[in-house]
Image: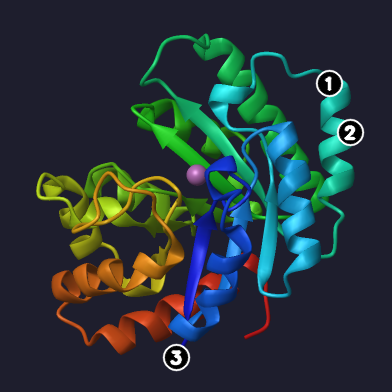
Amino acid sequence: MPIFDTHAHYDDEVFDEDRDEILASLKRSNIEKVVDIGASLSSCRRVKELADKYKFIYAAFGVHPEEVMDLKESDMDWLKLQCRHKKCVAVGEIGLDYHYDDIPKEVQKKWFERQLELAREVKKPVVIHSREAAEDTLEILKAYHAEDVGGVMHCFSYTKEIAREVLKMGFYIGIGGVITFKNARKIKEAVAYAPIESIVLETDCPYLAPEPYRGSRNTSLNLPYIVKAVAEIKDMHPDAVIGITWRNAHKLFGLKE
Ligand code: NI
């Protein structure tokens, strides 16, 4: 079975030198589908170009909580238009990030809520970025009945108690390179707790390269390290992890296998 990378940023400028080369090599390494995720209005433009150019790349359009400061309501009209693209499979990444305090929480919440409304309007699932903001994220997801559109909490970094709440809404949890880090006890517990049917694989590349490449530029070619870590925690064969998460990703994004 091929592997599905549910969260990548190949539009990032760190891939400018060898993007085509890397993308061309994915299929040989069994990586057959990738969702490239928008994080700002300008990155959404580049995501669209990649989805137009490569058959195996799908698009998510949205504005990351650290990029919302200068958003205007008219930007939502533009974003909505992008979401009509035939290869758009989700609205994202959207959410809350309280790690740095440069963007006021109220501003983050406003645009998170507005983009949840947008997802409902265009009937697409959401890709959620949530860091050090579990309670507010859950509260808003519940208030906006995000279970109606579904989605994934990407780079899941919370406890199994939070995982339980997320899974109750029918959401998936996205697992990437962090699962291979030594200090990832909490996330390993969450992965042990979550049924494999609720897990999707991701890289978040160029960020969060797994061990043994921690700290270097990440690509989807590193997915086997994440598969191996999940397989060990779940006591499953790596091929089973690949096969089930492949199916999960198609269900999440409403794609045919
Ligand atoms: Ni991301």
Residue 128 picture location, percent across and down: 52, 43
Q: What's the amino acid at mark 2?
A: Asp
Residue 39 in the figure: left or right of residue 5: right
Q: Secondary structure at mark 1?
A: helix
Q: Does the numbered disc 3 mark a residue whose Cβ is under 8 Å from ligand 1?
A: no
Image point (11%, 44%), residue name? 183
Query: Which residue is drawn at the image coordinates 74% and 33% (left, top)?
Result: 41
Residue 3's mark?
none
- Judge whether 251 appears above or below 11 on screen: below
Q: SS class of the residue under badge 2?
A: helix
Q: Are marks 1 and 2 in contact (CB under 8 Å)?
A: yes
The amino acid type of the residue labelled 1 equals Glu
Dot 3: element: loop
Mark linked to residue 1 = 3
Q: How many marks?
A: 3
Q: Quadrant of the C terminus?
A: bottom right
Residue at 68% from the left image edge and 64% from the top image edge: 58
Residue, disc 2: 77
Query: Disc 1 and disc 2: Cα gap in Å?
Result: 7 Å
